[in-house]
Amino acid sequence: MKPKGELVLDAASPIIDVVLAGTKLRLRVDPSQWGAIELNPDVATHLPVRFEDSGAAMVGRILLTGRSGPAILLFGQAKLPVTVAEHGRPIVSDADGVIGPEMLPFAYIRWRRADAPPAVASQTFALDFDENTGLGAIDPGIPGDFRVHVSFILPTSFATAAAGSALARDHQGRFDAPSAPIAAPFGMTRPARMLAFAHAVPIAGFRFDRIPVRIADFRGHNALPSDAAPKGTIVFEEGDIVIAKREPPQQAEPWVTIANDRLAGCAEVTYSAIPRSLTLSCAFDGVR
């Protein structure tokens, strides 16, 4: 089915009413969603769907086993075959699940925020799509194999460890605060540290003086900035016996997620299906 028409959503609560597998549900529409409708487990349990064990979801180094199955989605006049999945933890608290733009029949999807400041500029980025990580924008201003995700679900923008390594190398980045947990998908948290730059770094139109880096996630063999041990770190003396677990490097995945701390300054975010692109209309310099 060729995409047509447009869907306009409230960015503060981008929820649609659908019928999935004969059941009325409310789904959040989010650009960060991958190639299946992710359902909260209690909802999935009551759907007449033939679920089978499927690939796990990786939240950093945490592996969530899951199951998925085929279903029919009814939305307006559209009848669409889709895949639904659940991974044992709720994905959102204000809806029954999350659906990505790729699974809807619209040529344009617009997230609008009534209380955002007036947009001072628009930036359009080509998108690619990965079944495991969803839509990713290619920012020509960032060198190398670097993707940008957009999430109206997560509160805080962040970089993976591999992305943090590249940003630190290219922009004289250094850690300037101890590790602290940061919100991650499925209501989880992951350890992160604040990476400060020698100068503001433009990412997807926004200027970042500093950005949280999920230091344990998707780093590969990339080096992160070295620094003195933060206060409270245990220092071992000669003769101490230390038992440590050595974990193999995780595959490097360099990306930055732009979340609600920055998207709050966007009057409109527009997804275009053909050609696949994302346009941010925002008060970029007014958001830090």
Image (cartoon, rainbow, N blue to C red):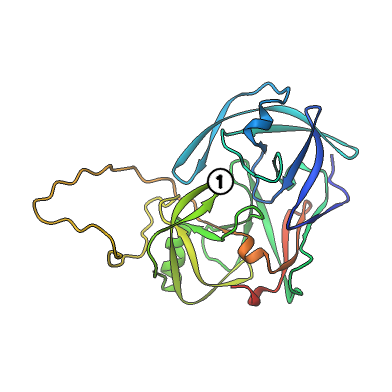
Query: 225 and 276: which one is in front?
Result: 225
What residue does disc 1 label? 187
Furthest residue to the left?
239
Residue 166 position (above or below residue 240): below
Amino acid marked by disc 1: Gly
Q: Position of residue 121 (x, y in %)?
A: 73, 74
Labels in figure, total: 1
Quarter assignment of residue 248: top left
Residue 16 position (above or below residue 280): above
Residue shown at 27%/59% (left/top)? 233
Left or right position of 211 against 233: right
Q: Position of residue 196 (x, y in %)?
A: 44, 71
- Give SS at disc 1: helix
Residue shown at 62%/42% (left/top)? 91
Left or right position of 105 against 136: right
Query: 98 and 26: which one is in front?
Result: 26
